[in-house]
Amino acid sequence: MPETTFLDATELVLNMGPQHPSTHGVLRVVLKLDGEKVLGTDCVIGYLHRGLEKVAENRTWVQFNPYVDRLDYVAAVSNSLAYCLAVEKLLNVEAPPRAQAVRVILTELNRIGSHLLWLGTHALDIGAITPVFYCFREREESIKILEKYCGARLTTHAFRIGGLPAEPYDGFQKDVLAFCEMFLPKVDEYEELLTNNRIWIGRLQNVGVLTAGECKEYGVTGPMLRAAGVKWDIRKALPYSGYDKYDFEIPTRTNGDTYDRYLVRIQEMRQSARIARQAAESLPDGPIMAKVSKVVKPPVGEAYVSIEAPKGELGFYVVSDGSAQPYRVRVRPPSFVNLQALDRMVRGALIADVVAVIGTLDIVLGEVDR
Amino acid sequence: MMPALLKKILLGDLWEGLRVTFRNQNPKYIYTEQYPSQRPVVPERYRGAPRLRTDPATGKTLCNGCGACALACPEDLIVVGSERNPETKKKELVTYTFDLSRCMFCGLCQEACPTDAIVLTQGFELAMYSREGQIWDRQRLEEGLKPTVYKC
């Protein structure tokens, strides 16, 4: 191989991350560049690996519950819901209707919070500084309800196997309804700021296009799949926790580019507020816990439950050997799977588009690395 | 076609966004908290600094030394030392340590407690100068967290 000099070097390898502000955590992307054009990428993950799946094997079923909040820490409630549903399936119990309704409310509020954080940071990556302040202002309101109910803001430990840890506090319904009332005009405000903005459109349209076929090949789920035109939402397709009782739509778009994903997520926030309002209005009375013994010992067997987390399909595959500790807990995180499509989306694009695409993937590294 | 073009030339889309910005200039939309002088009120259920409750009338601890909290703790950070009283033949609490540096405030200990002795209180100012300071003994836990007073 002839010795290469600086002058005939046409390919440049550049490390983006692990400490890059727009990689949303500790993701390292090795970029192969020709000038400013991206020839290929290589994601290096694992900087946040904590071995959570192994941790599960050394904890009891109940004790592992707070750990799942640390997967996708901006939507901890969804993780807790998926884990609890999986263990409940093993135990063959179902949470009572009141618990299910409260679960739906909290999950939807958390989805709004997660999407707001995404919108704020994504806009920040693109260069729009203002939306992040407005997004965090409203996110604070949704977090306040979670905090009042669960006692924590982010790592909520919101649900227990079989139901809820506590009755909703006095005025819970009123708070949720007030939030939904307040929130919808605010979404219009974000849209006013961004949707027609020429810089926003210029930076996002036809960037990181992923067609429906490619999405299916990569196993991409969530808003990214819906932006490509596939009407797939687990809340509708495989209803859990009483989602079939609520009236909502699945927003879809057709182009599958970054701009469409933005519009889909904006619409999803509206739908989430709609679901939360319906659930709060029709909150049934009754017990909040199903009959589950204090030491959870599921019978020998395995179960897989997937739910629609804010980022896509979040699945928990749990195996029990009949003891109080899980034999195996496997997480199917949406961020991890969606990240695989990064290379396909940015190949041939410019380096500035990589930032936009990582933003639109809506990844959380806690979930990617586990 | 024409109004759209005119709107584009006159930067209509940008003014639309700026309108939102100016609408939010109103001083009543200030959300900054003046932290040390103005403490936030955390909700009742907030899981913060742990406390080992004592009976307010007698000053005796409510803990019966059963160790359910230590068993429930996922991080295994509670150590309960108890002794059997030779007179009453009952278990009595001697030592109790709570390692806050490893605590993730999940609240499983307070749920497991049969006498509601260990509780996670609303105290949230848990910064310490040393790692050893995070390991609270029985006396510290019974006193609870005292809010820091700043000279303003």
Image: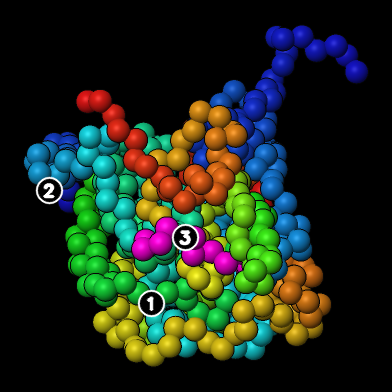
Report x, y in % for residue A245: 39, 87
Helix, strand or loop for the magenta stretch, by majority: loop
Taking depth in this image into account, of A286 and B7 the one nearest to the observer is A286
Residues drawn in magenta: B56-68
Q: Horizontally, is A184 left or right of B56 in the view?
A: left
List the residue tagged with mark 3: B60
List the residue tagged with mark 2: B3
Q: Amino acid at mark 3?
A: Lys
Q: Horizontally, is A276 left or right of B76 in the view?
A: left
Taking depth in this image into account, of B111 and A169 the one nearest to the observer is B111
Pointers 2 and 1 within a single chain: no
Q: Residues within 10 Å of mark 2 (few under 14, many from 20)?
A: few
Report x, y in % for residue B101: 58, 42
Decide if residue A333 is in sight here: no
Asked whether disc 2 touches disc 1, contact meaning CB atoms under 8 Å apart, the reply is no
Residue at image coords 37%, 83%: A246
Taking depth in this image into account, of A357 and A106 the one nearest to the observer is A106
Task: Quadrant for residue A288, please give it.
Answer: bottom left
Q: Amino acid at mark 2?
A: Pro
Q: Earlier in the sequence, mark 3 or mark 2?
A: 2
List the residue tagged with mark 1: A167
Q: Amino acid at mark 1?
A: Glu
Report x, y in % for residue A189: 21, 52
Residue at image coords 90%, 18%: A1
* Mark 3 or 1, closer to the camera: 3
Asked whether disc 3 touches disc 1, contact meaning CB atoms under 8 Å apart, the reply is no
How far apart, in angstroms, are the residues tagged by discs 3 and 1?
Answer: 31 Å
Taking depth in this image into account, of A44 and A354 the one nearest to the observer is A44
